[in-house]
Image (cartoon, rainbow, N blue to C red):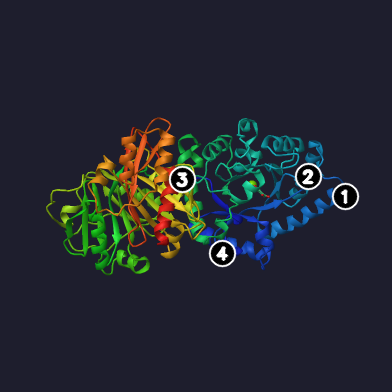
Amino acid sequence: MPLPKSIATVCLSGALPDKLEAAALVGFQGVEIFENDLLTYDGSPEEVGRMCRDLGLDVAIYQPFRDFEAMPEPQRRRNLDRAERKFDTMQALGTDLILVCSNTQPATLPEPERAAADLREMAERAAQRGLRVGYEALAWGKQVSLWRQAWDIVRLADHPALGLILDSFHSLSRGDDLAGLDRVPAEKLFFLQLADAPKLSMDVLSWSRHFRLFPGQGELPVAGFLRDILRAGYRGPVSLEIFNDEFRAAPVRRIARDALRSLILLDDAVRAEAPPETVPAQPLPAAPMLSGLEFVEFAVDEAAREQLGGFLGTLGFRRAGQHRSKAVELLRQGGVNLVLNSEPDSAAAERFEMFGPAVCAMALRVDDPARALARAQSLLSPAWQERVGEGEQRIPAIRAPDGTLIYLVQSGSDIWADDFHLLPGAAPAVPPLAGIDHVVQALAPGHLDGFVLFYRAVFGLEPEPVFELPDPFGIVRSRTLASPERSLRLPLNVSESRQTGTGRFVSAYAGAGVHHIAFAAPDAAALVAAAPDAPMLEIPENYYDDLAARFGLPDEELAALQVGHLLYDRDAQGGSFVHAYTHAFQDRFFFEVVERRGGYDQYGAPNAAVRMAAQARRQKK
Ligand SMILES: O=C(O)c1ccc(O)c(O)c1
Ligand SMILES: [Mg+2]
């Protein structure tokens, strides 16, 4: 049996029963009852304990007990009385373990012997009731802030009912690790809390209280931490303890599902190096090998289909197919397939009703659709069945966190001939596109970390650090996920401001979704030059003056960029990026043409401000 999975109630929003129900519903086996969640609840500890048992949840621990050890008298005696009352609560809840976090009071004495004597006394009193005490070093503890200091005290106290609690955040935020933990007897490892976090430079208390993340969402080496404690012999629950303002404001079941998904993924990450009895017997089905996007599908009605077809026509897209039985049209330009779906009573129609013209599906080319689907299901993303007509192929699909359908298409297969009447291609007037370079989604505030975990877990995409992009009306935070071989790149943008392009897109159309699609062009300048009717976004002359100053481009090259309203970026390795944007279609989504040269691997972030200002100017007109 793998170790039981647990979650602290502080991770989740709502009243205590909502938190417990959500934890049980998604499949957690245990909970940490966070004291504040009990204090603010209007039911007795006995009722809470019963509720947990009815839901099949083990109350793994009651926490925290603060500012206990090494206090001068008379606080010392009062603290022991306080402990007795918490033991009453624990017995009512039905848990045998309490977490004592290291003292943060300025008055704490710098005397490990005193701390040990106090904890020994507390443990002795606990033991008389069959209870146990675990000691955790808070990263900002006054005298004790590292796990080795906490261990020195636990060892000195030398009581069987006293042990150590490890929390990945407190160690990893300090750059510490678990080296030496193998010398701690395994029976002294009482409890394990896991949390990830982005790398931020701020005081560690604020960082911990507001910005913790589920494992895999942040940048701390949580998998290595878990591996080390399992190797040291820990065999208790693996418990998430995440203090995060956005999680505490979000719908509780969504966050609970993200939480469990993060632990399922973590199990798999440590499998190869963990003792076999601590992890599931079966590995997850391997992440798919991706080879780009087979198509992107838009929900439209008949009018929007004509208008979007016309808009894309200026970039060389042509009608290439008509579905045999549905109001679904294929547009093609070189290696890019776009599907316009105006079929009534479909997932697309539902999307159109809610959002107007919008991307409703993406199709990923994968090496093994059945395996990709099995992995998604193991990671709590159920399969989705779209209605299919007789004789039509059924493409496996799942839904992204915002409901966008993600089809899983066998790489190298022809999915079109069976279901579509294909139309002969006319000689293209515009040079062919090579494919889809990236697809940018605008997310509502509070959704970024859940999307990152979804794409990372289900598809094995790698997240890049967060960029902050200055829109004239606020900041857009952007984090990109990309497949290792870069055939799929998905930047995710989020903005607290409703006035930014991202914020307006999300709020005006009541939801997240694809905000722009970047097409890969072998020669972006040539493509724009051959597409004189394409509604390209005008870029101000000042931008080109600055480009000349920054990069020292030859005059002819600069002039060519300016004529085509093209933007330019260069990386430290000498790779470069040439790109241009269209106006937004019906003030919604827009398109980009990009050319990567010399291994350039970014997205032209330095140009985002220029693009967003140009879009805001058009918006004002
Ligand atoms: O922020 C805190 O006070 C706090 C409390 C209990 C914990 O287990 C912890 O890691 C932090
Ligand atoms: Mg903790």
Q: Residues within 10 Å of mark 4 (few under 14, many from 20)?
A: some
Q: Earlier in the sequence, mark 2 or mark 4?
A: 4
Viewer-proximal residue, 100 or 608? 608
> In the displayed image of the protein, which residue is found farthest to the right?
74
Give percent across and percent down for residue 578: 34, 40
Q: Earlier in the sequence, mark 1 or mark 3?
A: 1
Q: Is residue 293 above or below residue 403?
A: above
Of residues 213 and 148, the one nearer the viewer is: 213
- In the image, taking residue 482 as reference, residue 450 lies left or right, namely right
Amino acid type for the residue under numbered disc 1 = Pro
Q: Distance of mark 1 from mark 3, alpha carbons?
A: 48 Å
Name the side, left or right, on which 361 lies relative to 446: left
Whichever of labels 3 and 2 marks the residue nearer the N terminus, that label is 2
Q: Closer to the camera, 477 or 459?
A: 477
Identify the residue at image location x=58%, y=42%.
Answer: 200
Q: Given the image, on which type of amino acid does mark 2 rest?
A: Glu
Determine which residue is flagged by label 2. Answer: 69
Q: Which secondary structure, mark 2?
A: loop
Q: Is mark 2 within 8 Å of ligand 1?
A: no
Crowding near the residue tagged with mark 3, few <14, some 14–19, many ≥20 C-alpha atoms within 10 Å: many
Q: Which residue is mark 4?
A: 18
Q: Are marks 4 and 3 in contact (CB under 8 Å)?
A: no
In this picture, is 391 found above or below 457?
Answer: below
- Determine the residue positioned at 33% across, 41% down: 561
Q: Secondary structure at mark 1?
A: loop
Q: Which residue is mark 1?
A: 74
Amino acid type at mark 4: Asp
Give the left or right position of residue 72, taking residue 396 as reference. Answer: right
Determine the CA span between mark 1 and mark 2. Answer: 13 Å
Mark 1 packing: few (<14 Cα in 10 Å), some, or many (20+)? few
